[in-house]
Amino acid sequence: MEQADELRQTLVDLVPCVDLSQFRLSQVTDDAESPQSLFDRQDNLELFQPYIDRVWDYLGRPPSPGAESGDFAKSDTPIFTRHGKIKEKEAKTLLKRIAHLLRLILRHFCRTCGITPRAWQTADLIYRAVGAYLRNLQLLRHDTPFIGNPKAKQNDRLMYEAFWALPPHLGIILIFYLGVIRPIEIEIMKCLGIPTQDHEHYIFVHNHKRPPLSSYVFTPSTVNEILHCGTPELSYESRAYRKVMASIYDRHLSHLHQDSWESLLRSSGNDQAQHTENTNDGHYAQDEIARATGMPLSKRNQQMGVSKAFHAFFGFLPGNISWSSLANHCSRKEQEQNIAIALGVARRLAVEYYGVANGTPTHRAERVAELMSLKPFLLGAEVCLYDFAPQ
């Protein structure tokens, strides 16, 4: 939890001009079946742009003709002069702070996603397709960000059918970083004469000047060096993390093993339908991710369940969280309806049953204070109505 707090605070300190509480995953849209990056969708670009404008204004870049400057506090150390020329020293300092945020993101991902990917797989993760490789970062319709289809080997075009769900707070920070901060980072690097081609595709990249013809993508040794930093008790290389996480999985999350009750139920359903597992998963349990990747929904959901269980184990989700076969169901409309119904019921209880609307303002305030103290709406205890006499 301390690392999660550090990650959040680092982002807040980096862009204090932005109200991050207003940025939600439910505002971001994606189609996992589409090869198009969610960061290239027009609706998402319109979502990110106001945040980008606020940050640019905070950094002191003069607004373009016709644009209005924001009314929030400027940075104490703007990276632009009044004439729009970039200040090299201040810009490089900002890039170092952005690089620190990215290192925290990498470390947090490898320590919380489940059974950690290999170092070279982590280094090669992309958010925009490159050649034959699909983008690795996607968002399910019910606001669960995940990373999937990592490279199977370093020098070929194979991809593993492996998926890791991200903790909600990490998903928000990573998507905000790639959608808002990365475009700004790229423009600053261009002003400083630093190549940016790798930054258009890869998640984990250097943003300082590298030797000519050198890649800006993290190497496996860089990934391991980052994982070695921070909390001493958690300082391992990627291969050690894989063993630690696998041990946690076997010792504390054994209910997720293939011989679990849920797996038995699935087998029973296949038997009753006279289907093999391949028949059911290949023809009856299809969604956009299954169609895009060829991986059956049930197998993918089992892996997502492992990630969710690790999130709960580390305290990022409630301990009773479950990952059902309806995991890709878009429940936003149902949630909004339930919220409206719940508020309607609460309003009737407060006004009619508990008599909060009766009497003078003083009496109403006393009644509210008593209800908040006794909490009958939570505990189910009967509370007598006050007999307020009209004044």
Image (spheres, rainbow, N blue to C red):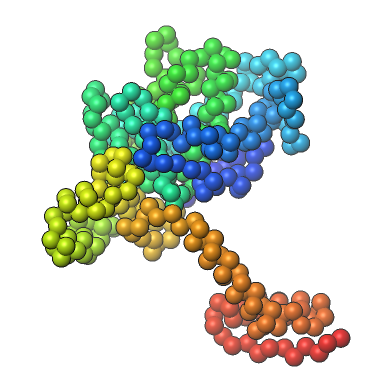
Residue 187 place in picture, x, y as percent: 57, 21
- The residue closer to the viewer here, 221 or 32, is 32
Residue at 58% across, 66% down: 340
Tell me if 195 is positioned left or right of 249 in this view.
Answer: right
Residue 236 place in picture, x, y as percent: 33, 38
Residue at 58% across, 45% down: 23
Residue at 70% across, 83% down: 355
Residue 40 place in picture, x, y as percent: 48, 31
Q: Is residue 91 above or below residue 321?
A: above
- The residue closer to the viewer here, 296 or 92, is 296
Res 385 visible: yes
Q: Is residue 336 above or below residue 28?
A: below
Q: Is residue 383 above or below residue 371?
A: below
How many numbered marks, from 0 up? 0
Q: Is residue 84 above or below residue 299?
A: above
Res 241 visible: no
Residue 250, quarter of picture: bottom left
Residue 111 place in picture, x, y as percent: 38, 43
Q: Residue furthest toward the right?
A: 391
- The residue closer to the viewer here, 260 or 248, is 260
Tell me if 302 is positioned left or right of 44 in this view.
Answer: left
- The residue closer to the viewer here, 230 or 356, is 356
